[in-house]
Amino acid sequence: MDVVGVAEYADLHQWSVDNRKEFWALFLDRLGISFQTPPDRILEGTAQNPTWLPGARMNIVTDALGGRHRDLAIVHGTADQIERVTVAELRHDVARCGNGLLEVGVEAGSTVAIVMPMIYEAVVAYLATVAIGAVVVSIADSFAPEEISTRLEIAKTDWAVTQHASTRAGKVLPMYEKVVAAGAERIIVVPGAAGPPLRPEDIWWADLLSDHDRLTYQTVDADANSNILFSSGTTGDPKAIPWTHTTPLKCAMDGHFHHDIHPNDVVAWPTNLGWMMGPWLIYAALLNNATLALYDDVPTGIGFAQFVERAGVTVLGVVPSLVAAWRGTGVLEEVDWSGIRLFSSTGEASNPDDMAYLMAAAGGRPVIEYCGGTEIGGGYVAGTVLQPAIPGTFTTPALGLDLVLVDDTGAVADEGEVMLVPPSIGLSTSLLNRDHDEVYYSGLPDLGRPLRRHGDHMERLPNGYWRALGRVDDTMNLGGIKISSAELERTIDGVVGVSEVAAIAVPPAGGGPDRLVIYAVAESGAVFDPDVLKAEMQQAIRSHLNPLFKVHDVVMVAALARTASAKVMRRSLRSSYEEAAE
């Protein structure tokens, strides 16, 4: 704000939108981003089809592993065994992996899938692949072979990297077997729990690592692909979204300004490379000279809470359902999280009560609510440490980007579908398996400025803050009144003994108004009479939302179906309910 010459944060955001070239030039200079060949200019082209940093030649790993870091790059392991890796050690391991990939035939432009938990070797493989000019194909380790196969085929993958088998919450999960079943041609296998013998064409991680520990990073055009990620769609093939070598700059900017990441921070976020927050975490931490923290197990129990304390985590990212799990079991009461400076939350709409609980667990630290998407390279709406953190709300559009809410008539409103106002570094400009312009730009209202479709349903509050109401396709019409799933779920989440809920609308077989169906997960040991539970939920809706909304059915399940990024798959629940009713 001092550099730009403004006194209020809102003026800084407005300046960043009105002066996008100058904003990104300032940020690149602030972080000291290096180019083998500097760009001719910051931006050219149109808002719908921009080219950022035209003429630039670079490799983003040069800055991620540059010499500007403090000594510690990564802490990883479990609460009882934490390993610390310096920048020099990480650079050494990336060089050995990168040279090994070159020696087995991977070259610039080749695609390498990473299908494994986000452990240390996954980060090394990721950085090494990008460093040699190849392209990472990010695939969540939780996917079944059929889903892995779809993504391998879409990205025309040459190699895959996976773990022999991973151990999570005491269970051994086959990884290598899944990737073989998915049809991967050649696989690099990181040791883990025991698994089947390797095929002749596959190799062990140790055999991949080269004896040559110096690597020349491949210089590429700034808009060359570095990573292919996939949307979390629940029907049809997922959208394949390329990230370029400029996309990490968006990750770094959001981390720098909105998450206030400093060189002395230790940043943790339970995630994986199949969700955009995996690559985001790597770049947001390393490009800001901070330390990356990786936990090698599920984050729901006391082990993760202890790891956060013992690893010295200062910035902790969460998914709202994870906070609900901690609150339900009380694990945070057994640890000292006073070292945490701030939290961030993304992936789904937050429950304000859960976020208030989380803030209190660290002595009143703020939660930076953060919402975006894979095709954004980060967030479009967030918070800052300059503004009061009100649980479950966002304070500002992201710097360098703006948004408007559009209602069903195409008019600007205080509640409606999110439309982004491009351009911004990070926004996708192509899709591998879709028409990009058709997906993001077709059929939008004419408001006198360029708009880009996003699909979130959001509300602008009277105090100027924002609240997420889920996806537009998660909005339902009950008795002629539109309501979001998130709003209903927030209302009934406080029913005693229930840990999670998902609200869906199901049309009756013979036609007519949608019926409200609630899927619910019981807390450990809780037993319900379905009729009593339905009555309690109905009372909560009647008292706190709208007495016209009637609960048609309550379905108890052991767990809610979720995507790899932990979003509730309401469309999947809807399909299951409709099939069961047939």
Image (spheres, rainbow, N blue to C red):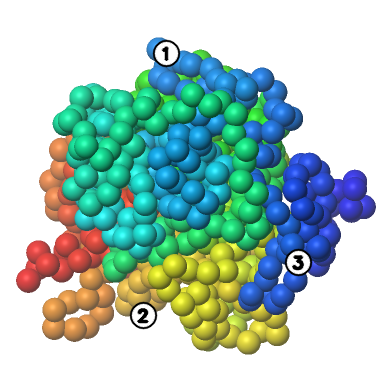
Q: Quadrant of residue 90?
A: top right
The three-letter amino acid code for the residue at tag 3 is Leu
N-term-proximal mark, 3 vs 2? 3
Using the rendered image of the protein, determine whether residue 5 is visible from the camera's viewpoint. yes
Give how far across and how far down residue 227 sits, in percent.
50, 52
- Asked if residue 193 is positioned above or below residue 245 in the image, the reply reads above
Q: Nearer the viewer, mark 1 or mark 3?
A: 3
Q: Quadrant of residue 187?
A: top left
What label does residue 81 carry, if any?
A: 1
The three-letter amino acid code for the residue at tag 2 is Gly
Residue 543 shown left or right of residue 147 in the figure: right
| Residue at the image point whose x is 23% and y is 65% from the top | 574
- The foreground one among 525 and 408 is 408
Circle 1 sits in a helix, a strand or a loop, which is it? strand
The three-letter amino acid code for the residue at tag 1 is Gln
| Residue at the image point whose x is 39% and y is 31% from the top | 208
N-term-proximal mark, 1 vs 3? 3
| Residue at the image point whose x is 81% and y is 63% from the top | 41
Q: Distance of mark 1 from mark 3, alpha carbons?
A: 47 Å
- Asked if residue 202 is positioned above or below residue 542 in the image, the reply reads above
Name the residue carrying label 3: 43
Give how far across and how far down residue 85 sits, in percent.
55, 20
- The foreground one among 57 and 350 is 57
What label does residue 266 carry, if any?
A: none
Crowd tier of the residue under label 3, counting other residues whose Cα lies within 10 Å: few below 14, some 14–19, many 20 or above: many
Q: Distance of mark 1 from mark 2, alpha carbons?
A: 56 Å
Name the residue carrying label 2: 480
